[in-house]
Amino acid sequence: MSGKPDLGVKLGPLELKNPVMTASGTFGYGREFESFVDPSLLGGIVVKGLSLKPMAGNPTPRIAETPGGMLNAIGLANIGVDEFIEKKLPWLRGLDTNVIVNIYGHSIDEYERLAAAFKGVEGVAALEVNISCPNVEMGGMVFGKDPSASARVTEAVVRNTDKPVIVKLTPNVTDIRVLARAVEEAGAAVISLINTLTGMAIDIDRQRPRLANISGGLSGPAIKPVALYQVWQAACTVKIPVIGMGGIMNCRDALEFLIAGARAVQVGTANFVNPRVTLEIIEGLKGFCLEKGIDNINDIIGTLKTG
């Protein structure tokens, strides 16, 4: 090979300078990490999930460390869409990277209004739709556990936005392929997975849950094998691009997801352990390509041999 490897990838209409992104809820609104990372060096930033109105989230304690990971029950605390557009987006617009806004609602109407709020708004490359939320219109059932509900949310967002739509899938289902097909057919441009696994931890001295919310979302290295399998299943099932995440702590982890078929990765919990980890992963990908004589990172995407 000649020169440095090309790390550029495409996610449908999105072009990324490299396949390394941040995962929603682990990188704030971007600026919180600027003393550690130049966000413009990343393939993309996914900001903290936004709701229509500001939300305080769940009561504390809402984070608990577990073997190989962490549980969180933050409750999607955020500043709301209006304040984000007014106070956070102006700084983000100055970055030379893809800024992706994660949105979540508890009804189809909320998703429609959130999508419409970003219509025509400059500086937002795409919307990532968190469907791991309870549907108040269906008795609290999580949208993302039901293929038809997932499809309805996807259709509603696609209908009300001029941005590419990424749908983030929950792993807490029997067959991820059914959900992946449902949102693809409903118009998603990209899917991302996996969101956190549901779990809990108990304080044996107090005989009480370690989270005030009782259960929370498990993330970190402990979930990587589950994430890899579901990403591979999804990549083999849909024609649209797949973003992989779940327990990525270093370059080798990221490479596993790319080989499994993900066209890009999102790094989450690792940001809390090492705030510069995304840049280290990018450098690691360059080094791997140089070592293996690979000119273009796309040459290793989806190369898993199973026969």
Image (cartoon, grey):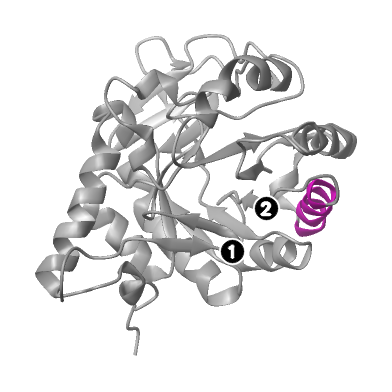
Q: Which of marks 1 and 2 is nearer the N terminus?
A: 1
- Quadrant for the N terminus, please: bottom left
* Element assignment for label 2: loop
**Image location of residue 219, percent across then percent down:** 41, 38
Start-end of magenta stretch: 147-158
Residue position marked by numbered label 1 in the rendering? 12
Q: Quadrant of residue 146?
A: bottom right
Q: Is residue 254 visible?
A: yes
Q: What element carries label 1?
A: loop
| Secondary structure predominantly adopted by residues drawn in magenta | helix
Which residue is located at x 15 percent, y 75 percent?
Answer: 293
Q: Which of 115 and 238 is in front in this view?
A: 115
The one of 277 and 293 positioned closer to us in this rendering: 293
Placement of 169 over or under 214, stated as above or below: below
**Residue under the image location 32 percent in, 31 percent down:** 38
Q: Can the viewer see residue 250?
A: no
Residue 105: x and y in percent read: 76, 32
Q: Would you place residue 270 above or below residue 29 in this image?
A: below
**Badge 1 vs badge 2, beta-carbon distance below 8 Å:** yes
In the picture provided, is 33 more to the left or to the right than 122? left
Q: How crowded is mark 2: few (under 14 residues within 10 Å), some or many (20 or more)?
A: many
- Mark number displayed over residue 296: none
Sort mark 1 into few (<14), some (14-19) or many (20+) by Cα contacts within 10 Å: some
User: In the rendered image of this protein, does residue 76 appear above or below residue 39?
Assistant: above
Residue placed at 63% from the left, 10% from the top? 56
Q: Quadrant of residue 33?
A: top left
The image shows residue 262 at horizontal and vertical percentages of: 44, 64
Placement of the C terminus among the 4 image quadrants? bottom left
Nearest the viewer among 193 and 60 is 193
Within the magenta stretch, is there residue 170?
A: no
The tag on residue 164 is 2
